[in-house]
Amino acid sequence: MNAPMPIPGLVDPVPVPRPAVARADGRVDLMGLPRENLRALLIDAGLDPKQAKLRAKQLWHWIYNRGATDFTVMTDIAKAMHPWLIERFVIGRPEVVEAQLSSDGTRKWLLRSDDGQDYEMVFIPDADRGTLCVSSQVGCTLNCSFCHTGTMRLVRNLTAGEIVGQVMLARDTLGEWPSQPEGRLLTNIVLMGMGEPLYNFDNVRDALKLVMDGDGLALSKRRITLSTSGVIPMMARAGEEIGVNLAVSLHAVTKDVRDELVPLNKKYGLDDLLAACAAYPGANNARRITFEYVMLKDKNDSDADAHELVRLLRKHKLPAKVNLIPFNPWPGSNYECSTAERIRRFSDIVFEAGISAPVRSPRGRDIMAACGQLKSASEKKSRAQRDREMAVV
Ligand code: SAH
Ligand code: SF4
């Protein structure tokens, strides 16, 4: 079992080995800047406030509605101004190191930041929707014992630009510019990639605001889900300041088992967590909280566990749905997935109590893109091998 990380203070700090750095060429990447900051940046660069306001509005439209990465296509901005912009700014995208396609249509991208940090995003197409699974950190400090991401050594928060950049890149790949209200392939976003989003609150909030902005990517908050392992002190703020759907990685119903699986439980216990869920702003019967529950053989999958889960959800009067996730193995993991019959039985018990408990079908297992399998193993492959694989995607 992993030793729990030491967690000082009210909200745990995240080790940030390097701050997000300025680009080597000195230009500023506009990606991810809140509206006000974009305007302030133009004023700092020498525009008068009135001009800055207009230009910021135009830039915003080109960046987030049209997907532009090149200032010269911005036809409503005077040609004479293009070199001025090019000299000072860029509209960046994460670098794609590797792109993989699963036999079930799931796509996984290994991305690299300007300062050489690797992270991943996954796109999961379904008949009626397309879900982009976005990372919030490089790695994760929380060391959940069944999660591959938790074993990564290097951890840093992704910037708002790197987070929204994943959505921009997915739109590029899917050819979904300009932003359209109808007929999109990318319809939903889940913050369920690498990292604990509530340990990177400000950047996640700023990125999601851009995603939800009606003049920009224009995705409804109802189509966005943030998953947390239970960072209680940040949950109310997430509801108030972001307002997206909440998913909570519960995974166990007793202190002992949850302490082992999700070491953060030692700091923020089960009862307090469920009370915080009950108080989550915006949760109601029409917008339920999702409880994720990984199915681990002989660990958390008994009938008694299922009954206890129902009892806890009822006790806290939670508008809840339960998402049962078959455990996805990874090299070196110490757990086994519950049998299909066990998962079915567990689901039935919860369902018979009037709580929906679907089993999530694993997607992208063959390319290690399924829940909890993400870990940047890019260095193990040669450049040539990656290029060969990229060519077929
Ligand atoms: N850090 C956040 C969000 C990312 S993980 C969180 O923990 O909620 C997305 C979901 O996948 C979480 O519920 C996580 O517990 C689960 N998960 C992690 N490893 C897994 C594995 N090996 N098999 C199945 N689910 C896993
Ligand atoms: Fe981090 Fe979530 Fe993995 Fe736990 S399950 S180690 S919180 S990414």
Image (cartoon, rainbow, N blue to C red):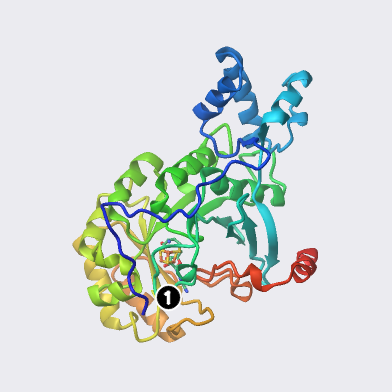
Whether label 1 lies within 8 Å of ligand 1 gets the answer yes
Question: Quick check: 344 above or below 248?
Answer: below
Label 1: state its secondary structure: loop
Dividing the picture into quarters, in which one does residue 305 lie? bottom left
Q: Quadrant of the C terminus?
A: bottom right
- Regarding ligand 2, which quadrant of the image does it lie in? bottom left
Local crowd size for mark 1, using a 10 Å CA cut-off: few (<14), some (14–19), many (≥20): many
The foreground one among 110 and 154 is: 154
Dividing the picture into quarters, in which one does residue 290 lie? bottom left
Question: Quick check: 292 above or below 221?
Answer: below
Residue 149 located left or right of residue 75: left
At a point 47% along the width and 71% down the height, the residue shown is: 151
Q: Residue at label 1?
A: 146
At a point 67% along the width and 66% down the height, the residue shown is: 105
Q: In which quarter of the image is the N terminus?
A: bottom left
Counting from the top left corner in percent of width and height, residue 353 is at: 28, 70
Number of numbered markers? 1
Q: Which amino acid does label 1 sit on?
A: Phe
Question: Quick check: 16 above or below 345?
Answer: above
At a point 28% along the width and 51% down the height, the residue shown is: 233
